[in-house]
Amino acid sequence: MLNPYVTRINIMLQLFFPPGAGCSVCGSSTLRLVVEYGMIGPDMPNLPDLKGLLPEEIAAALAPLGAPAFRAKQLFAWLHRRGVTRVDEMTDLPADLRQTLSTHFHLTAHSMLERATAADGTTRYLFGLADGQTIESVYIPEATRATLCVSSQVGCPFGCTFCATGQSGFTRNLTAAEIVDQVYRVQAELPEGRRITNVVYMGMGEPLANYDAVIRSVRLLIHPLGLDLAQRRITLSTVGIVPGIERLAQEGLQVNLAISLHAPTQADRVKLVPIARKYDLDSLMAATRRYVQTTGRKVTFEYTVVPGSNDREADAEALAALVRRLQSLVNVIPLNPAEGQPAGMRLHPQELRARAEQFAEMLRRRRVEVAVRASRGGEVTGACGQLRQRHRPKKLFSTSLSGLV
Ligand code: SF4
């Protein structure tokens, strides 16, 4: 069956120039244009997206339509507390207002393309977006809480060497509505009485590179008329986007900040995290210190142990020196045996975990507050981006513009 998102298929063109009238750029007598075929979705709707608006913004948008301001609160609660996906589900709104809303606004609502659940309940979701792109979210249930790891971008521009998402390239930022709808679609699947209690922005993409949409999505999630999530149950993760950390310090939010460090020296960090060339370790640590001073909040340093690369005694010593005087926790993460990683990184998951535990012990001996991220989800806890990579449409042709003489 044809995928519903395949709406355009482009055609290969081959142009033959008459003698003496070749390409003015390269002089070739034949120009072949081969265009990529792929999953290309319908254009994003042009209408304003109601799901991305705060109650006061909804009120302002409704005013020209003659709807009273109190309708904005009702509407916001339908979208963000009850998680409805269609205007006609808002049964306490007058029928004529529902009709007006459906012609003047768009409502983001992801389609669930696939889910994979492990024995412990950890579930990885693949969502389809309105333009045919796909993103992943991971639900992690525990005894007293339920965490959703959300994506903030389609792909990621930063290309960290150990990350499946980073290897797949960057397509676009998500809107605030597209971020929060991951929460609402998963919430809608949970059994009666089970609620998502924590949201971590550690899925596909770099949250602070999509700053405005991410902060807006946080404000939507914490709004008392909506999900009313406690700020301290939200964690923003960053690979070290210094201007974003500086802005976040001034935002007046009480969310958690997790910094993906992964190496304790500038020389080693740039090998794993290429954006460290732009935002080097000194400026990252200086921004982090200012963040802690301004907010009074502890930061978490995420440290993925890449065996043989960043788990030596010297690495532990350098890392301890960096973080010891900061109000911080080092979260040591066993490397994920992701597809597409260099062969040298391929170790059995148990060996990867043992190496992470060993490194954590080196840090504890140096009086660093440290935790080792628990293994969850068995077969579905591959790095974010793996499910999506397996579902990427097969390219029939590659994109190329080549002159043939
Ligand atoms: S680790 Fe984060 S910032 Fe780096 S490529 Fe992956 S998603 Fe992007």
Image (cartoon, grey):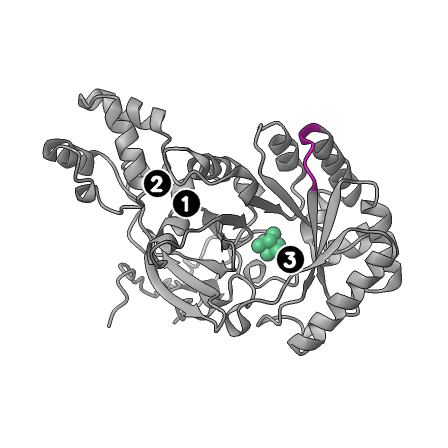
> What residue lies at 43% left-to-right and 59% top-to-bottom?
22
Residue 104: x and y in percent read: 21, 34
151 vs 239, left or right, is left
Q: Which residue does the numbered mark 3 point to in the structure image?
A: 160
> What residue lies at 68% left-to-right and 36% top-to-bottom?
297
Q: Is residue 353 above or below residue 303?
A: below
Q: Are marks 1 and 2 in contact (CB under 8 Å)?
A: yes
Classify mark 3: residues with Cα within 10 Å, few (<14), some (14-19) or many (20+). Answer: many
User: Ligand 1 closer than 8 Å to the CB at disc 3?
Assistant: yes
Q: Which residue does the numbered mark 2 point to in the structure image?
A: 80
The outermost residue toward the left is: 96
Q: Can residue 29 be seen in this view?
A: no
Residue sitting nearer the eye, 174 or 142: 142
Range shown magenta: 294-298
Three-letter amino acid code at the position of disc 3: Cys
Spatial separation of the CA atoms under disc 3 and disc 2: 34 Å
Three-letter amino acid code at the position of disc 2: His
| Element under disc 2 | helix
Classify mark 2: residues with Cα within 10 Å, few (<14), some (14-19) or many (20+). Answer: many
> What residue lies at 69% left-to-right and 47% top-to-bottom?
300
Tell me the quadrant of ligand 1.
bottom right
> What residue lies at 48% left-to-right and 64% top-to-bottom?
402
Spatial separation of the CA atoms under disc 1 and disc 2: 8 Å
Q: Which residue does the numbered mark 1 point to in the structure image?
A: 180
Q: Do the residues labelled 3 and 1 touch (CB within 8 Å)?
A: no
Q: Is the magenta stretch mostly helix, strand or loop?
A: loop
| Element under disc 3 | loop
Residue sitting nearer the eye, 288 or 14: 288
